[in-house]
Image (cartoon, rainbow, N blue to C red):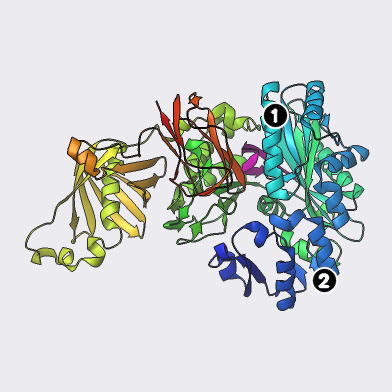
Amino acid sequence: MGVRTVAVYSDADARALHVRECDEAVRIGPAPARDSYLNADAILNAAAATRALAVHPGYGFLSENAGFADACATAGLAFIGPPASSMRAMGDKIAAKRAADAAGVPTVPGYLGADQSYEGLLAAAELIGMPLLVKAAAGGGGKGMRVVRESSELRAAIEGAQREALAAFGNGTVFLEKYLTAPRHIEIQVLADAHGACIHLGERECSIQRRHQKILEETPSVAVGEALRSEMGAAAVRAASAVGYINAGTVEFMLDADGSYYFLEMNTRLQVEHAITEAVVGVDLVREQLWIAAGRPLSLSQADVVPRGHAIEARIYAEDAASGFLPSTGRLTAFATPDGPGIRNDAGVIAGDVISSDYDPMLAKLIVTDRTRDACIQRLTAALDAYRVGGVATNLPFLRWLARNEAFARGETTTGFIDKYFTPSVLSRDGDNELAVMCAAAALLAEGNGPQRGDPWQRLGEWRLASSERYVAFVRPVEATVKIHWDPFSATWQCAAGGRTVVVSERGRGEFVAFADGIASPFVAWRTRGSIALAFDRFHADCALVPPPTVAEAAKGHRHAAHGIAGSVAAPMNGKIVKVDVAKGAAVEAHQVLVVMEAMKMEHSIAAPHAGNVVEVTVAQGDAVAAGDVLVRIEQ
């Protein structure tokens, strides 16, 4: 459009991709969001310094902050979003439900009262019945939300939701809502201008979620026919018009199995998944946002909205699905995305970037399009297989499983999909552990000053006096000693263990291909504490090296387990301790919550791996911890 862009960034994002891509970039503060991306004054000062005319808030941080929209207007800046009044009406979930109800849009039964005491909420919960949802009034993205199935869980759910909402949004107000056990999450994209026009651009289904956050979205939904689409679209337009909405927004619904639908909330901003609507409708939503903010009328009418084909978006997260979708941090040693017809990658990172605990763990969005849903799923499957990410755990193994899942292919996509069909064991059942340790040995020797890079004596070919063989021992996932040597003629690692040979070729730093049994297996590898992590197309392996013994252990003639001291419970990532539920001397049961930590804008419960007695608690509320730090020690 010929519009110059200015990026704002925190210290954590000084080398981020958005900083490199924009025409100018301005630092707005240190890593914590409250001191940078949530600092409205810093952003307005950056706009003034660069003589910007408008602010696009994206889809996080201040994007739904009415005070920030007001501040932009006061500063003479166009806010590329709705008026502050619309934000206030829809940004508070309680006010939004009341507005939708007044506009004749059905809403989920619940409690929207002002009494925030535990006693008041308990009384309301007993009237609603179980199961129910505790939700943050100012929330979004699954933050400040808890499912309660029994009354005994209510107090902890309320306290956790209030604490998380206060930290994320500065508002700890919650409300209660009847929990629909297996609905579909359907959202309608709307566009409205300042001249009274408001249209919808069809639906997106976003039912496949973990922790109430979306993982995969598609359009159109297999559960929405033309008549229902028209009815829900009209309801979304009524809800938006009722609050004088302008710009792009999304009205979200729960769709029950009987075809009943209920207003959930309105996101007064651009959605993460907006690209799949763009793909099937042929409308650049961001371009429309800019024109609307500039005062122009909509460039299309409802009759111009003609969906074609099918589109699916998969969110690539730095998280380990096999460990409860726990976020992962570290430096990206490899990041290679697929390419080709019908494939779009909206990535926020490149190889070498550091994934910290300061922000959301989403790395990229993969958007695929095709003529039919079946063809789109095939394209999605191939594109996911071509993704290569190293340095952090990702949800790619989960997404690959999902793309091949028969229930997904049949369109049985409710919000209970993951609970019903997914178990961590499905991600590791095809793991070839013997192959993994041989690949890990090659990756270890290829690292840093590996023979093919830094050691000229290993590169002399026939002039070498002798072939240099090395041995690498592993204790996990299988106990094995790998014999390995570098072949300069083929530029490959020759690995042998258990009577089997694997040839490994390095095709880029951190990226490899293993040739075994007539099959080529691409993988990425990176170092962790005491191990080599590998990500293949279908499985992930953590190959633990034999650790050097301590002096005391050497004197006793044995070594400790590779994964650490028995009974220690460690922090899975960098973060902050928000709650400690045990004390020294306490008896605990297996899976009992010991510590609650905050990282990547979410709370994570750290549980006991086994029953026993607490012999040491090394942290207190408010402490900052690093990945691997011991939090609690338990004597079994």
Disc 1 vs disc 2: Cβ atoms closer than 8 Å? no
Task: Read off the residue under disc 1.
Answer: 155
| Mark 1 vs mark 2: in front | 1
Query: Residue 236, located in which quarter of the rendered image?
Result: top right
Specify which label sits upstream in the sequence, 1 or 2: 2
Q: Residue furthest front?
A: 585
**Amino acid identity at mark 2:** Ala
The residue positioned 83% from the left and 57% from the top of the image is 82
Q: Which residues are magenta?
A: 203-224
Where residue 328 sits: x, y (%)? 49, 47
The residue positioned 82% from the left and 39% from the top of the image is 232
Task: Find numbered disc 2 in the image and state the secondary structure of the residue it sits on.
Answer: loop
Relative to 210, does residue 15 appear above or below in the rendering? Answer: below
The label on residue 75 is: 2
In the image, 505: left or right of 214? Answer: left
Query: Residue 45, located in which quarter of the rendered image?
Result: bottom right
Where residue 208 sits: x, y (%)? 62, 37
The answer to whether residue 325 is magenta is no
